[in-house]
Image: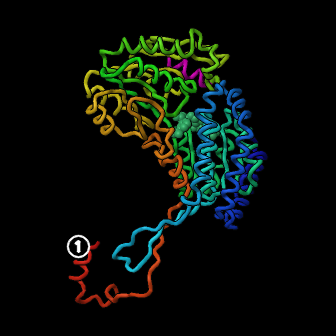
């Protein structure tokens, strides 16, 4: 971007923020009926654009209609329904039991919006991961600027149109663009930043937020392990694993990145996985309408490099021109290989093995804390030990991904996989500052706390001992 264009972009962005701040200060967004009416209008607009969203996702990376609805459109509508149904309850000040130390008082928790919020979205679930935080940020009473991903141009255009058709720019708007626009947005002062994307860019966002001490949520990625012991029904495991790994072409932040299987089941596991892949996507997955493409050529190149020197047990076919890579299984990659050092984010499934629990520790403790964790087993004590021993954002026992589907469960990472949680009411809370308020009664004002303190020490100790 040349200097003139850069100045223009910065001016436009700071104008939008200034209008949003003005609108926020008008207190309009705190009016619950106003918020509700806009959420309802947003729902009407999104429903009217259902086909446009599905078509855009297909144009962007050949996502099938079924996956588009299951993993994006349907979830957005559910979150919107939830917010519309519960908004008044969520936003209402909550009475909290008071303490003897504040007696006489009535204590409350108020939920207030932060103000003007920036949402940066990734490309892999481009509609869901822009709209879900947007819905909860607006439900909580904020004004919002969303920057959808530059890599999914068709979906980003639909997002911009939907927002524009419902909201004045001073309340919510979508600004499309790549790194330059993100950088220009991050240079501004926000009241809150919500970022979904890679750990690498998450660090840039955290640094930008630190400049103004802006609170930030980072929804990042990582290498999520999937442990499989020898007590399982392998056919069922293969069914679930092929679904969870190859959904969205393996480009899912919570996809199992790699498998750690008990060594005595490895060969059979690979055999049932092959059968299952053939059953789901056929002999030629490139021709399957249900198998998406890799988002762009850079990522195909990246995945091709990850496969170099790997022992491929199945698949490995690449058509770079079509951004296609077939569902691929890699047998026992080296732990120091690039494949095991970075998040794969594609349809490549490495199978590692273990004999002892120390073998599992050696693998998992040498990788940053993952976003998700999966264990397939019928051994209760093994399950309990693994989910309690390792630190991760969220997990599933005997299946994959489905923790994302329960809005009552907070979703997010830990350490390198992120900070902050959302989904459903947790999302509303994430975009709200919880303000404790104590309303002191005037009918009783014991002189005990006031100076002079002489002779009051022993009563003070007793009060803390029994009532503190
Ligand atoms: P990304 O980090 O490359 O991009 C995310 C956003 O940041 C985009 O809007 C992009 O324009 C912007 N961006 C890119 N480079 C930037 C820079 N230098 N400065 C400022 N902003 C910049 O991520 P992606 O490739 O779009 O998505 C894939 C990653 O996101 C994976 O690591 C995946 O695990 C993660 N992810 C996490 C979740 C989650 O919920 N935790 C969900 C989806 C994806």
**Residue under circle 1?**
465
295 is higher (above) or lower (below) than 443: above
Give x and y (percent) for residue 180.
Answer: 68, 42
Give x and y (percent) for residue 227.
Answer: 36, 27
Furthest-front residue in this view: 85
Taking 248 as reference, is 99 left or right?
left
| Disc 1 crowd, CA 10 A, few/some/many (<14, 14-19, 20+) | few
**In-front residue for pair 224/320:** 224
Give x and y (percent) for residue 358.
Answer: 26, 28
The answer to whether residue 261 is visible is yes
**In-front residue for pair 320/283:** 283
Q: What element does badge 1 sit on?
A: helix
Indicate the quadrant where residue 101 lies.
bottom left
99 is higher (above) or lower (below) than 49: below
Which secondary structure class fits the magenta region best? helix
The N terminus: image quadrant: top right
Indicate the quadrant where residue 362 lies.
top left
Taking 222 as reference, is 23 left or right?
right
The C terminus: image quadrant: bottom left
Taking 140 as reference, is 54 left or right?
right
165 is higher (above) or lower (below) than 158: below
What range of the chain is rendered magenta? 298-307
Q: Residue at x 62, y 60 (%)?
A: 115
Label 1 C-beta lies within 8 Å of the nearest ligand 1 atom: no
Question: Is the image coloured rainbow, by chain, by secondary structure, or in one colour?
Answer: rainbow
For ligand 1, give the image quadrant.
Answer: top right
143 is higher (above) or lower (below) than 47: below
Q: Residue at x 39, y 29 (%)?
A: 398
């Amino acid at each position: 971007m040349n200097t003139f264009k850069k100045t223009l972009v910065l001016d436009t962005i700071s104008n939008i923020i200034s209008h949003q701040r003005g609108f926020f200060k008008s207190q309009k967004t705190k009016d619950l009926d106003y918020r509700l009416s806009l959420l309802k209008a947003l729902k009407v607009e999104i429903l009217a654009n259902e086909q446009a969203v599905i078509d855009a996702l297909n144009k962007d990376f050949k996502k099938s209609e079924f996956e588009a609805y299951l993993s994006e459109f349907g979830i957005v509508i559910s979150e919107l329904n939830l917010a519309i149904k519960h908004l008044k309850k969520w936003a209402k000040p909550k009475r909290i039991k008071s303490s003897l130390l504040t007696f006489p008082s009535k204590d409350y928790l108020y939920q207030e919006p932060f103000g003007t919020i920036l949402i940066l979205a990734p490309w892999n679930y481009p509609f869901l991961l822009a709209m879900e935080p947007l819905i909860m940020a607006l439900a909580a009473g904020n004004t919002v600027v969303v920057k959808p991903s530059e890599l999914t141009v068709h979906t980003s255009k639909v997002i911009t149109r939907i927002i524009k058709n419902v909201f004045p720019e001073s309340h919510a708007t979508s600004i499309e663009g790549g790194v330059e626009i993100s950088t220009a947005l991050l240079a501004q002062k926000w009241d809150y930043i919500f970022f979904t994307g890679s750990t690498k860019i998450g660090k840039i966002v955290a640094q930008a937020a630190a400049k103004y001490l802006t609170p930030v949520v980072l929804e990042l990625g990582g290498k999520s392990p999937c442990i499989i012991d020898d007590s399982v029904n392998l056919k069922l495991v293969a069914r679930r694993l092929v679904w969870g790994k190859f959904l969205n072409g393996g480009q899912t932040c919570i996809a199992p990145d790699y498998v750690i299987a008990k060594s005595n089941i490895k060969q059979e596991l690979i055999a049932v996985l092959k059968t299952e892949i053939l059953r789901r996507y056929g002999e030629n997955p490139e021709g399957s309408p249900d198998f998406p493409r890799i988002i762009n050529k850079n990522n195909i190149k990246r995945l091709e490099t990850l496969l170099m020197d790997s022992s491929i047990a199945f698949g490995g076919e690449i058509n770079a021109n079509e951004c296609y890579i077939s569902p691929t299984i890699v047998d026992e990659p080296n732990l120091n290989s690039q494949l095991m050092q970075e998040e794969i984010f594609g349809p490549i499934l490495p199978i590692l093995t273990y004999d002892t629990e120390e073998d599992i520790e050696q693998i998992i403790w040498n990788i940053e804390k993952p976003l998700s964790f999966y264990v397939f087993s019928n051994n209760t004590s093994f399950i309990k030990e693994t989910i309690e021993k390792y630190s991760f954002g969220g997990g599933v026992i005997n299946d994959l991904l489905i923790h994302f589907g329960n809005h009552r469960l907070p979703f997010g990472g830990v350490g390198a996989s992120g900070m902050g949680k959302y989904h459903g009411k947790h999302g509303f809370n994430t975009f709200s500052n919880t303000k404790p308020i104590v309303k002191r009664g005037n009918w009783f004002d014991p002189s005990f706390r006031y100076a002079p303190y002489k002779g009051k020490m022993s009563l003070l100790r007793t009060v803390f001992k029994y009532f503190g």
